[in-house]
Amino acid sequence: MISTITNYSIALLCVLNINLGFDVNKLVQKRMQKEITKIFSCKDFELQDVTSTPGFQFKNSTYLVQHQIFEIKKEGALLGYAFLGTAPSKTDTFEYLILFDENFIQKKAKILVYREDYGGEISSNRWLSQFENTSLTERFFYGENISAISGATISVKSMTQSINYVYSQLQLQNAVAVR
Amino acid sequence: MKNKLPHLLAFFMISFGSYAQNVADSLEISMNQNLLQINGYQRILQNLEAIPNGMTLGGYAEVLYNQPESVNGEIDVQRLILLFGYKFDDRTQFVTELEFEHVKEVYIEQAFVNYSVNNSLNVRAGLMLVPMGIINEYHEPTTFNGVERPSMDNKLVPTTWREIGIGVSGRSDAMSMRYQAYIFNGFLSHNGTAGLVQGSNGLRSGRQKGAESVFRTPNLSMKLDFYGINGLRLGLSGYFGRTQAANEVFDTSGSTVGLSMIGFDARYNLRKFTARCQYITSSIKDVFEYNQLTAKDLGSGMSGYYIEGAYNLLPIRNRQRLFAFVRYENFDTHASVPSNTDRNAAYHRKEITTGLSYHLAPGAVFKMDYQSKSTGLDDDAKGQINAGVGVWF
């Protein structure tokens, strides 16, 4: 009897686990937290969603389907910003993260979730490092200051355009200019 | 009629061109209208909590004109492929491509389920492309120069080469590498009445394409891609196994042959310059017995390479691109032959292709080129003019 219950519980747990596995939001959150921990060398930070607060408001576009902006704080002090964006790939979308320091200098770009087969090469740390240490005034051009990846052209262009759009929008915001 | 042909052709190309432009424009509009239509972009998540599933429509097409010297030309809707994808959830997708060749032949080019375990591991099964060289996997007309695919990717790598199988794929972001490994069904070398593979086009006629295919011996296919140097992508492919034969002849010596194929490819981009090259070599076993049984002339070794350079004549920030390119191919489907088969020098082909690829918009291209083809038998090159339109969406 007890063993039957145990077996059922294990089966139920497995089902629950699988369901949790499909929660994109959780996966994105988890990977974002991990990356912030690594880049800012700090575990006990707080994230404050500032997406719809003055100084950070802007609309989505063709290359930015969805976004969120967070302030990264530790004991009230501002460490930097985390930008979470969704951009189109050939037939799907992918989630990316950009981490900025407190002066909006990019520290890191990372692809958090890439779904389709085509274009997954843009997740290469090496390719993404081309965006690092840039300020919001920088603009990126495919083939000019951003190198191509054969077989991933559509996603390379999408990511490049998406970052250009985000930089231009953040640059327009007063709050950013003041800091 | 002969005089009218160029006018007709020009009219056709212009009208198709403006049509392609309209399609591209309307796609742009639909994207800007924030995804009102059912297309690939509709599945874009309005918020991260939305259930990420749905249908994808896409496709590619090539409408081509080939004009060899002093014989009739051919105008053909060479391929029209409709892609349907369905995402059951964030991990589970089905991808299928329905192909119409020359308007009236229908095939399934791909039909597989992909299950994504995580970023670095996918399991997939169904009718899939064999990863060998560049073109078999990246064959959409806007991704390569030249009206026709490289000839080597017809005779040596039998594009579009697809069979039913199961395997894994994935990538390492830290190492900038992608891997694929599959177990596939192999070529059919004997259908019970005749041998199918031969010297002129290697294994091409042995493709089973997933249609009531004969299976006994599994074949292994692998590819590694490395893209960790900016602008450069390297590929190493391998295919190992044995062909299949119908039940009636399966135990007959020579009804099947062993096959090992190895490919190396490189693609490079630097600003307005692009280049690619590919080397393929195959070794086929038990060809002596096969040729004896079937009276065919299959070679025991096939190998060759091509090298291509292209330069974009338009400013780099332009949306349109105009590539001028030149490609040299040198391959031999009779690189080696068994002792009971005469080596046919006509199977050693050398081709130079030079022309233009005019990308009207990302996904729509006009192509035109001139090919000069010669063989080991006859050094007098034969010329051919090609033109075509291609789309991919």
Image (cartoon, coloured by chain):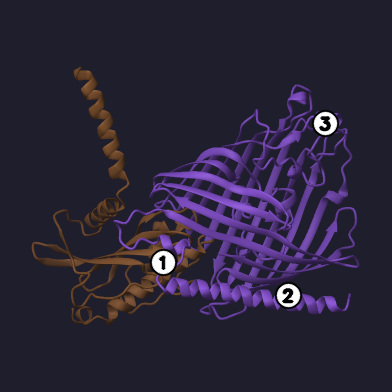
Q: Colour of chain B?
A: purple
Mark identifier at residue B12: 2
Q: Quadrant of the C terminus of chain B?
A: bottom right
Secondary structure of residue under mark 3: loop
User: How far across and down, in percent of the image, does residue B155 sit?
Assistant: 75, 49
Secondary structure of residue under mark 1: helix
Q: Which amino acid does label 3 sit on?
A: Thr
Chain that appears brown:
A
- The structure residue drawn at horizontal position 36% and vertical position 70%, both measured from the top left corner, is A163
Q: How many marks?
A: 3
User: How far across and down, in percent of the image, does residue B30 sit?
Assistant: 46, 72
Density class for disc 1 (Cα within 10 Å; few <14, some 14-19, many ≥20) is many
Q: Which comes sooner in the sequence, label 3 or label 2?
A: 2
Position of residue B68 in the picture relative to residue B317 (left or right): right
Q: Do badges 1 and 2 share one subunit?
A: no
Q: Real-space Cα distance between discs 1 and 3?
A: 55 Å
Residue topped by disc 3: B193
Secondary structure of residue under mark 2: helix
Question: Farthest residue in the front direction?
Answer: B37
Front position in the image: A122 or A135: A122
Residue topped by disc 1: A159
Front position in the image: B375 or A7: A7
Is mark 3 in CB contact (under 8 Å) with mark 2?
Answer: no
Q: Can residue B204 be seen in this view?
A: yes
